[in-house]
Amino acid sequence: MILNDLRTLRMRMDKASHSSQQVAEFLVSQPQIEEVHYPGLTSFAGHAIAQRDMWLVDAEEEYGMPVNRYGHLMSFTVAGGHQAARRLFDRLQMIWRATDLGRIKSVATIPTISTHQQQGDEGRELAAVPSNLIRLNVGAENPADIIADLAQAMG
């Protein structure tokens, strides 16, 4: 099973990364979203480093030139604090709500109620994990469907 996963890893990462860029650009344009953290955005603090180092392996064979791919993980903060983030999170329909990331399907989590719950407010502040932060693993679904789910959850 591991070998099967490895054989399709490049293709899956290409698709998920390409979709993630579209989702990140959509989120940046939404007034309900304060900030989007994704290496593919020029507003991301580490964008220049990501642009220098994050390349799709063998992209020249498929695209005829080198292609940046910035991964399938991002996070964003929701305007209105924790309750607004929780409302958006609870309204997601296609995107799975879970505590783990890194799947082939789109999954979201709120760290303050999952992975960082036991740190307490001081620990989360030290780790720069605000209460209105949502982490998103963009999967292999059509990016328009992911965007539509986020849009309806914001509405």
Image (cartoon, rainbow, N blue to C red):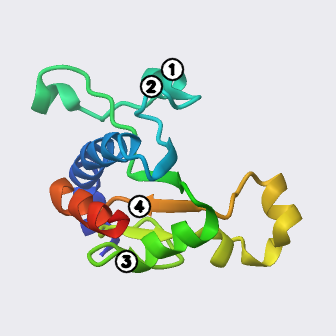
Q: Residues within 10 Å of mark 4 (few under 14, many from 20)?
A: many
Q: CA distance from mark 1 to mark 2?
A: 8 Å
Say which residue label 2 marks. 42
Q: Nearer the viewer, mark 2 or mark 3?
A: 3
Q: Which residue is mark 3?
A: 91
> In the figure, 52 relative to 84: above or below?
above
Drawn side of residue 146 relative to residue 45, left or right: left
Say which element carries label 1. helix
Q: Residues within 10 Å of mark 3 (few under 14, many from 20)?
A: some
On the question of residue 58 being in view, the answer is yes
The residue that disc 4 covers is 137
Closer to us: mark 1 or mark 2?
2
> Is mark 2 in CB contact (under 8 Å) with mark 3?
no
For marks 2 and 4, give the CA distance.
20 Å
Task: Name the amino acid type tagged 4.
Answer: Asn
Secondary element at image label 2 = loop
- Residue that label 1 marks: 48
Image spot of residue 104 (x, y percent):
30, 67
Q: Which comes before the other along the chain, label 1 or label 2?
A: 2
Residue shown at the point (33%, 36%) measured from the top left: 69
Label 1 vs 4, first from the N-terminus? 1
Pick whichever, 145 or 83, lies toward us.
83
| Viewer-nearest of discs 1 and 3 | 3
Q: Position of residue 57 (x, y in %)?
A: 30, 35
Q: Point out the frontmost of discs 2 and 4.
A: 2
Distance between mark 1 and mark 4 Cα atoms: 22 Å
Query: Residue at horizontal 53%, vertical 67%?
Result: 85
Closer to the N terminus: mark 2 or mark 3? 2
